Every structure is written in structure tokens, then in C-alpha cells.
Amino acid sequence: MTLHDFIRAMPKIELHVHLQGSTRPETLLKLAQRNRVPLPSDTVEGIREWYTFRDFPHFAEIYGVICQCIQSPDDIELLGREFLQGQAAQNIRYTELTYTPPRYIPFDEQLDALNRARAWGEAELGVTMNYIVDIPRECEVEIANLIADWAISGMGKGVIALGLGGPEVDNPPEKYPEAYAKAKATGLVSIPHAGETVGPESMWSALKFADAVRLGHGVRCL
Ligand SMILES: [Zn+2]
């Protein structure tokens, strides 16, 4: 057995992975067609090529288009099921999944869709997940407050943390004092991205202001 095979076969947990960022090219094409969202290519090969990492802005652009293609609870359940199939194929038994909620679908419907996928994954595949509900760093304060309220409403139903992701430059967690105060008051922990594209000052801000219990990335610490 090779080391690769050994690691693939061993039971694992995954703590940093995004639902939207795990969308298969085939599924993105299907969702785009269903929801009439234009894509830069209409073939699997073209989408796979477009998915190739170039730089953070290009990555964020792709993430934004994927988010636009998700327009119903059925879309969310489909992504959740396919995500868990991928985790099961890698023997990842438990995942803390970062989820960026679309603002135009009631959150209880989104969470119900994710939990239908989770119940299916538990019964059929023997894998499960909980959710880190993510504030995009570039969003308006009102949206961040709404997402914090949504995350709090999902405690006990799969939501285990408030996340923070997206463009780190000029978008510190200090933009969102109310969202963090609410999360802290209810005991919802904070797992922000930090130290992804900005250095130690961003990581300190995540630790001190956002009360992070864990950082996503944290690689620019020196
Ligand atoms: Zn991430």
C-alpha cells in the first residue's frame, strides 16, 4: 500500500472546506442552466479550466458566480449531497463545512435543505457534517448582522460557528461589532479566515476582536 492509499483509506475529519467551493463543474453547469446564470464556458472541460487557481481575485470571482447559481433549497440540498459523496469517497467521516448563505432564501429553508442532505449522508454513506456560517468580509454591516442572526438561529441544528471569509485587505472583523457581540452573547464561537492574504495584524484582529477559537489559514504569521 502506498502512503497515498494509506491516507486515503484512513478515517479523517476535515475542518476547513467550503460548500460552494466544492461545487463540481458538472453540477455548476446544471445549476447555471436551471437558474439562467451565464458562465464563461458551457462544457465541463471549460469550467474545469476556469476553476484553475490564478490569484485570489479570480478565485473570489468564481466563488461569487457559484453563489449566484444557487437559488433554491433544492439547489442547496443537491450540493450538500454531492459534497458528502465526495467526503465519503475520501473516508472523511466528519466535516465542519463553511457555508456562505444566499441572502434571498429564508435561512430556515437553507438549513433544512442542508440537514436533509446530512441525514441522507448519515444514513446512506456513514458521514456527517456541521456548519460554519460565513460572513463575506466585503458585505454591508446589515448583511453581516443578518448572517449572525441566522447563524445563531441555527445553533442546535447543525450550526457550530460564525465564520468570516473573503477579501481580507481593508475588511477586518472590526467592521462588524454588532455581529460579533451577538455571537459572543449567545455562546456561538467564531472561526474566521485570517492570515490568508494579510499578515499577523489580521490574525491578531481575528483572535482579539473576533474571539477566534480557530483560524482558517493563519499561514502569514511571520
Ligand atoms: Zn476557506
Image (cartoon, helix red, strand yellow):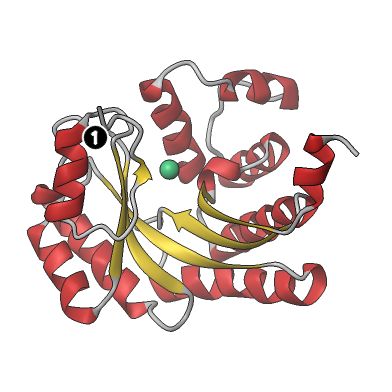
Image quadrant holding the N terminus, namely top right
The percent position of residue 145, horizontal first and vertical second, equals 18, 63
Q: In the figure, 156 relative to 90: above or below?
A: below
Image quarter of residue 4: top right
Q: Residue at x 84, y 40 (%)?
A: 5
Quarter holding the C terminus is top left
Residue at 57% in and 70% down: 113
Location of residue 3 by image quarter:
top right
Image position of 75 with respect to 157: above or below: above
Quadrant for ligand 1 reads: top left
Q: Is residue 126 left or right of residue 107?
A: right
Q: Nearer the viewer, residue 129 or 61?
A: 129
The reply to whether residue 104 is in sight is no
Q: Nearer the viewer, residue 68 or 62?
A: 62
Q: Secondary structure at mark 1?
A: loop
Q: Is residue 26 visible?
A: yes
Residue 188, percent from left and from top: 29, 73
